[in-house]
Image (spheres, rainbow, N blue to C red):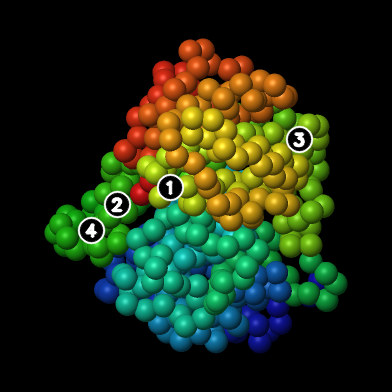
Amino acid sequence: MASPSAADQRLKRQIQQRCEDDRAWLLTSQPFTAKLLMQLRLVAVVDDRLPTAGTDGESIFFNAGFMASRSDADRRFILAHEVWHCALGHHRRELGRELTRWNHACDYEVNALLKQALGHCPQDALYRKAFVGQSAEQIYARLPAGTAPPGQTLDVHQPAAVPGTPGQVHDPDFTPQQASEHSARQWRQRLVATAQQIEREYGRGSLPGSVQRLIDRLRRPTVPWQQVLAQFIHTTLSGSRQWTPPSRRHVHQGLYLPSQRSQMLSLAVAIDTSGSCQDVLPDFLSELAGILGACDRVQLDVLAFDARITQRQTFNEGELYRLTQIEWRGGGGSDIRPVFTALEQDAPPDVLLALTDGHIAVPNTPPGYPVLWCLPESGCRPVEWGTQLRIGG
C-alpha cells in the first residue's frame, strides 16, 4: 500500500486549515451546529478507502481532494451534515433495515433539516422537499426498494479502515472507530445541553425551527412507531435464533449481513380491512417489508379479515415488495378469531402482527406466540394480553 505523497500532505494541511476556518465561520452564522461541531476532531486524509467524508462519532474524516473540489458553502454543509448524523444517532436506528436504502433515508432527513437551517444544500445531494420535517424511519417507508434516488450521498456512512487492494493509497491518519451505544447516548446529552447553552446566550427562539422541534422531541421523547416495530421483531426473534457468518446474498452490494442458521423466520400479519385502518396500511406494510428485507429466509402469512378471512397470501423474502400492491377487500363486521383458528391449524408463527382499529371480537385467551396489536391513533386496545403499538404520524 502506498502512503500519501508530499503533494498530498501539502493538500491535507491546506484543506485542514480551510475546514477549521469553516468551523469558525459557522460559529457566527450557525452557533448551535458549530458548538456541536466543536465536539468532533477534523481530520483531513488522502486515502482511497474514503472518497468523500465520514464520521465515527468522535472524528470527521474527509478526503482532502474531495473537499478541495467543493465550494465554501458545500464544504460547510458537508461538515454540518456529519455532525447531524451523530446528533440524530442514525447508526443505532438502523435496526436491521436494508442498509443502502436506510443510508439514503438518513441523508434525506439530515439534508432537509440543514437546508432549512443553513439556507443551502449542494445541488448533487439527496434532498426532497416532501421529506422536510420527517424522520428517517418515515422516509425509509416511502422510498422504493432497490431504486437509486436522484442525487448522491456526499459521505460514507460508518467509515471503516478496511484492508484495501494493492496500489491503493492508505493514510495512517484515517483511523475510524466502531460506533457505540455509549456514543449515541453522549450525543443525545450534547444536543440538549448545547440547546440550553444557546438559549441562555441568545434567548428562546434563537434556534432554527426544524432544530427546535427536534430538541423539543428529545426533551419529551417519543419513539417513532417504525423503530418500535423493528425493535419488537428483533427482540422477539433474537432469543430463539442463531447467527452464522455473513449472508452471501448481499456481498455484491458490499453489505455483510448475518444469515440465519436454522428455521425460516415465520411471521403472520392480520389486516383488519375496516376503513379506519386504510390510511396507515401502506406505510405499515412498506415498513414491515423493509425490516424483513435484511433476513435471508422469510415466510410472511398475510390474512385480511372482517367477520371472516377474506384474503390470505404467503410471501417469501423475494416477494416482500408485493405487499404494497395488494388490493384489499372487506367490509362488514370485525372478528379476528377466525385468524387465530386458521393459524392453529398450521404451524404457529413466530409472531403475529395484527393491524386493527381494535373494535373487533377476540379470543378469550392468548395464543402460544407473541402478538403485537398495531393500532391507528384513533384505535383502542382490544384485549389486555399482547403488546400495543400506535401507528401514525
Residue assigned mark 3: 264
Q: Return the residue nearer the eye: 89 or 346.
A: 346
Q: Which residue is under mark 2?
A: 215
- Three-letter code for the amino acid on which mark 3 is drawn: Met
Residue 245 visible in this rendered orientation of the protein = yes
Residue type indicated by callout 1: Gln
Instruction: Find disc 1 in the rendering and name its residue.
Output: 278
Along the polypeptide, which appears first: circle 2 or circle 4? Answer: 4
Query: In the orientation shown, which residue stands out farthest toward the front?
Result: 332
Task: Please tell me which of labels 2 and 1 falls first in the chain.
Answer: 2
Disc nearer the start of the sequence (1/3): 3
Q: Quadrant of residue 44?
A: bottom right
The residue carrying pointer 4 sits among few (fewer than 14), some (14 to 19) or many (20 or more) residues within 10 Å by Cα, namely: some
Q: Residues within 10 Å of mark 3 (few under 14, many from 20)?
A: some
Residue 143 place in picture, x, y as percent: 54, 62
Q: Is residue 74 left or right of residue 104?
A: left
The residue that appears at 66% across and 20% down in the rendered structure is 344
Going by the numbered disc 2, the residue's amino acid type is Ile
Up-down relation of residue 66 to residue 128 (above or below): below
- Note whether 52 is above or below 181 in the view shown: below
- The Cα atoms of the two marked residues, 1 and 3, are separated by 30 Å
